[in-house]
Image: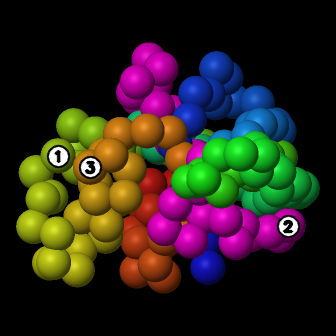
Amino acid sequence: MDFAIKTEIADARAETFVFTAQKTMYGGKTIAVGDRVFLFASENEGGRGLVARGVVVSTEPVAKKAGVERQTPRVSVAIRRDALAKRPLGRSELKAFDDWNDGRPQTELNFKFYRQATNKIIGVSNETAAFLDRFF
């Protein structure tokens, strides 16, 4: 499985990214060393959407807080960049894809990233990974 992360990214041209205690949803908690990741600079943090692609070089699950009943799993990851995006893809490009059952890669991304606009790591389908590869 491939993954995508939407979070604050200060420098998309960095060789390595380290993201601490990231929320995981839609299979994101299974991310592991060697997995491919598409990096989205969060518009909530002033970013512009898809900026890079990379490979996970380390992961570490974050322990749940004692006494808190419902918690979203979190993980810290380090990612080595292997490509920069050549075309934009973010909230504005995906907003029109809101028929949640149409099976399109754009709809999967809009649903998983922007229906609940929090920053997070998500798992993406093979079709969506192939779609994202066209941006590099």
**Disc number placed over residue 115 in the picture, else none:** 3
Could one spot residue 3 in this view of the protein? no
For disc 1, the neighbor class at 10 Å (few under 14, some 14 to 19, many from 20) is some
- In the image, residue 48 above or below residue 106: above
- Position of 99 compared to 87: left or right? left
- In the image, residue 34 above or below residue 65: below
Provide the residue designation for mark 2.
Answer: 33
The residue range painted magenta reads 23-48
- In the image, which is nearer the foreground, mark 1 or mark 3? 3
Quarter holding residue 28: bottom right
The image shows residue 68 at horizontal and vertical percentages of: 65, 46
| Sequence order check, earlier mark of 1 and 3 | 1
- In the image, residue 13 above or below residue 102: above
- In the image, residue 100 above or below residue 109: below
For disc 3, the neighbor class at 10 Å (few under 14, some 14 to 19, many from 20) is few
| Sequence order check, earlier mark of 3 and 2 | 2
Residue at x-position 44% and y-position 55%: 135
| Sequence order check, earlier mark of 1 and 2 | 2
**Disc number placed over residue 95 in the picture, else none:** 1
- Amino acid type assigned to the residue bearing label 3 in the image: Arg
Q: CA distance from mark 3 to mark 2?
A: 28 Å
The image shows residue 113 at horizontal and vertical percentages of: 38, 50
